[in-house]
Amino acid sequence: MAIEMKKVSAGKLRAIGYDAGARVLQIEFDDGRVMQYQAVGQELWRRLSTSGSMSSYFRDNIEEEFTARRVR
């Protein structure tokens, strides 16, 4: 599954992407890791991608709440 990534500069986050059909959020971190978070709803993606403090939103609402799988 290739997820289109949008480059960001928010704390440790370097790029974010979302597959609405699979409900998978993909995050690239500043250390090169790429993680996929399963079962993330579209509203959560919308809030993350438009947040003024993306890094904090990710930490508070996604990082500990969803199952992550490392893809790189």
Image (cartoon, rainbow, N blue to C red):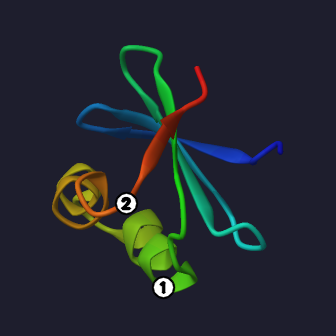
The location of residue 23, given as percent across then percent down, is 64, 69
Q: Position of residue 41 (x, y in %)?
A: 52, 79
Q: Is residue 67 left or right of residue 70?
A: left
Check disc 2 and give the amino acid type: Phe
What residue lies at 44% left-to-right and 45% top-to-bottom?
68
The picture quadrant where one finds residue 58 is bottom left
| Disc 2 packing (10 Å; few <14; some 14–19; many ≥20) | some
Residue at 28 percent of width and 63 percent of height: 65
* Residue 32, above or below 27: above
From the image, which quarter does the C terminus lie in? top right
User: Which numbered dot is residue 69?
Assistant: none
Could you tell me which residue is drawn at 48 percent across and 85 percent down?
A: 43
Closer mark to the observer between disc 1 and disc 2? 2
Give the residue number, with chain letter if any, for mark 1.
Answer: 43
Q: How many marks?
A: 2
**Which of the 4 image quarters holds residue 61?**
bottom left
Say what secondary structure mark 1 lies in. helix
Which residue is denoted by mark 2 in the rendering? 66
Q: Residue at the far bottom: name it.
A: 43
Outermost residue to the right = 1
The amino acid sitting under disc 1 is Glu
Q: Earlier in the sequence, mark 1 or mark 2?
A: 1
Residues at marks 1 and 2, CA–CA distance in whole angstroms: 15 Å
